[in-house]
Amino acid sequence: MSGQQIIEAVLQRKIRFITTFFFVFLTIYIFLFIVDFLPEAPTEQETTEPAAELTEAEREQMSEETDVLQTVSESPLNIEVLDTEQPVTEVATQDMPVSMYIEKLDRTVDVLNPVSRTIADLDTALLEGAVRHPDSAAPNQDGNVFILGHSSYLPNVFNRNFQAFNGIQNLEWGDTITLTSNAVIYTYRVEKVYKARASDVTVPIADTGQMLTIATCNSFGSTDDRYIVEATLQATESA
């Protein structure tokens, strides 16, 4: 075999290798794309900064940490139900939210109100939208309306409910969140945004005034980090 033939044979082998490598790489990439295994990092904003015009009292209020209370929930996310004149456990007949609108994200999310507290049932409900925790208050009741929703930063998902709460970490003080029931529209003002481990988060449900707390949730049984948004009721109007 001449030198020229050897060079041509080597080049052919290189071309075949490069072609095969490119084909295998492209096939793997397409497969990962289809199964949503190409992650996209979220823009993290662990805490909100108050606007310049805030008073000193408002700054102090925004810096307060949540109280550490005893858990009474099956989930590692701590839920505390305190005694009130109108027990939170009786909210099944109250005015339940059916949707949530987050103005800054221009996103409307369905809200489910399951009765079961089992992790499996709550996780199943998360596939259909955000979920109001069954131990939390209704919007028309004194107490904390606690709603969890999925967040996923995979670029392609077949079920959009996996991205229901994408971006809530970017909310800031003063942003508005609207809960709508069959009869009333409830408008809340964001007070605080932060990140925490699920096992470290305590959500007081009663004796809190009329509040809304929303949180990202991989699973009700997960201890992964969550973004938490706390808001207070500002106005109501007929739906």
Image: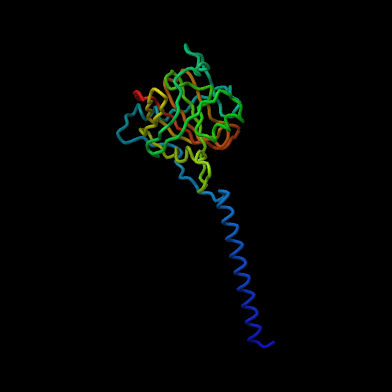
Q: How is the image coloured?
A: rainbow
Quarter of the image that includes the N terminus: bottom right
- Nearest the camera: 59 or 197? 197
**Residue in front for this viewpoint, 150 or 230:** 150
At which x and y percent is residue 73? 58, 24
Outermost residue to the front: 182
Q: Nearer the viewer, residue 151 or 161?
A: 161
Residue 3: quarter of image? bottom right
Identify the residue at the far right of this view. Answer: 1
The image position of residue 34, as x and y in percent, is 56, 51
Which residue is at a point 64% across and 75% down the rendered structure image? 13
**Residue 80 or 8: which is nearer the viewer?**
8
Q: Is residue 77 above or below residue 153?
A: above
Q: Name the quadrant containing residue 55.
A: top left
Across and down, in percent, residue 20 comes to 62, 67
- Which residue is farthest top? 85
Residue furthest left as drawn? 53
* Picture coordinates of residue 154, whole percent (x, y): 52, 47
- Left/right placement of residue 1 relative to residue 200 reads right
Image quarter where the C terminus lies is top left
Number of dots carrying numbers? 0
